[in-house]
Each structure stands twice: as structure tokens, then as C-alpha cells.
Image (cartoon, grey):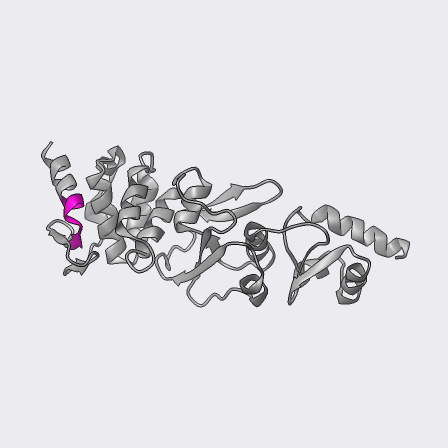
Amino acid sequence: MDSESRSKLNRLLTAWPQASVAVSRWLKAHGAYQQLVHKYQKSGWIQRIGQGAYMRAGGTVEWTGGLHALQEQLKLPIHAGAKTALQMQGYAHFLAIGKGGTVSLFGNSGTRLPAWFRQYGWGVELRYFTTKLFTDYPNAGLTKKELAAYAITVSAPERAMMEVLYLVPAEESFEEADLLMEGLTTLRPLLVQLLLEQCRSVKVKRLFMFLAEARNHAWVKKLDLSKVDFGKGKRMVVKGGRLDAKYNITVPETSLQRKVSVNSA
């Protein structure tokens, strides 16, 4: 490799966060055009992991390093959400997202994951959901999670819990959602209020408030539910459950009894 190519490579590696993916667009922006990329591959400096995506040769990348590339290099509106986001921020300690775990990613309606991201062996089960939950305010409740060499966008706990409820009962169980809500004692009422007003899912809003009230969280008292549209009609969340008269959703009898007990205390 000539000195100019080596100099470009050094600058490239300095700008390239450890354990992350680099896509062709980013490499080109840093002076590594396709011919030079092939030269770096041949010299054993970088390794192709899929169409238009690369990693440092001899290194490793996890799904977070791939997500970083989606967000920062390709500017795709995709984030880690639901149980994955809760676990990454210190909630849901009983949930594993390491090797063999499940990772939940969320994107705006119509946003597709690149083939290289879908096909690479990250060592986890990837679940990708496109929703219209917060179409009018798509960045509401998103935050940055700092990792060792880079940061990724994830749902704050307030939004992550609503994403969990979006997946109930088809992808997540009511019982696990209830346990997750139990641990959310410090949610920010101003953000919860914003998300409830912006959320487009009647089921999510009703179920969120039912679980929060059943757990008697202090932040519930700071919400103004008169500004939230809870829709009309009944919603079945659990087959064979009992109807909660306030939110018109069917829930397990034990959860309804707990809520009644809290309200009568």
C-alpha cells in the first residue's frame, strides 16, 4: 500500500468508531472510494459484512454497531424500543438482550431495514416493527444511549413502555407488561402527558393508564387525562378477561382486583 493510501486509511480508522459498521456512503465521504475500499479489503484492513457494509478486519460488531450506522450514516428513523430500550436503561433486569436474546427495533411506517442489517448474524433475534404510534411527533420520547465508542437512539422509558403495550397481546404478554410497569416508579409526568396526547393507539393509551393506576404510581396524579383522547367503544386485550369499566378494556381478573383494591384504599 502506498503512503497516500495508508494516510487515508489512518484518517479513516481514526474517524471510524470501534466495533461499529461503516457503510459505503460514509466511507466515500471519508475519502475511501470503491476502488480504495477494495484495496483496503485486499490488504486485510476492512472486511465486508454485506452489500455496502463493512467492519474492521479482525474485530467484532454487535447489533448496536449496526444500528449506529443506520442512524448516523444512513439517517434512517429507526431506534431500539420496547423491552430492549427498557433493559438498556436499567429497567427489566430479568430480560436478556445479549447473545441469544431478542432485540426490538422500531421504525417509521415505510422505513425498511437494509439487507445487510437483516442478514448479518448478530447473535440475537431481531424483531423490527414499523408503526404510526407517534406520526405527528416521531421523535417524542427518544433519547441517546451512550455506549463504549458511540451512541445510539433508543426510546426513553416512557415511550418504551408504550411500545411494549403496542405489542400486547400478539408479541408480548399482558403479564410481562404488568411486571415492567411495576418497576416504572420514576417516569416523568410531563413526557408521559405529551406521549399520551400524541399516541395514536387507543389500546395503548387505555392499557398504559390502567396498569399505571393499578400499580399506584405517584406520577399518575400529575397527569391531566382530560387532554387525552381515549376513543370510544370496548377493546379486548385479554381473552376471557374482565372489563375495566373506566377504560373499557378486558384484562385479567387479578389485575382488575388489584386496581380496585388500590382505588378503594
Quarter of the rendering containing residue 218: top left
| Camera-nearest residue between 11 and 122 | 122
In the rendered image, the vertical position of residue 98 relative to residue 236, given as above or below: above
Q: Residue at x 74, y 46 (%)?
A: 14
Q: Position of residue 178 (x, y in %)?
A: 27, 44
Q: Is residue 259 magenta?
A: no
Looking at the rendered structure, the number of numbered marks drawn on it comes to 0
Question: Is 120 above or below relative to 228?
Answer: below
The answer to which quarter of the image holds residue 229 is bottom left
Q: Report the front residue among 234 and 102.
A: 102
In the picture shown, does residue 118 fall above or below 175? below
Q: Residue furthest right?
A: 2
Q: Quadrant of the C terminus?
A: top left
Where does residue 75 sit, x and y in percent of width and height? 55, 58
Q: Residue at x 85, y 56 (%)?
A: 5
Residue 138 visible in the picture:
yes
Highlighted range, magenta: 249-256
Q: Position of residue 212 (x, y in %)?
A: 24, 41
- Give the side of residue 135 with respect to residue 221, left or right: right
Image coordinates for residue 55, horizontal then vertical, percent: 68, 55
| Residue ID at (30%, 39%) | 189
Which quadrant is the N terminus positioned in?
bottom right
Between 137 and 234, the one lying in front of the other is 234
Q: In this image, 67 relative to 251: left or right?
A: right
Q: Is residue 169 left or right of residue 115?
A: left
- Is 187 situated left or right of 77 in this image? left
State whether residue 228 appears in this view.
no
Closer-to-camera residue (168/201): 168
Q: Which residue is at a point 21% across and 57% down the rendered structure image?
A: 237
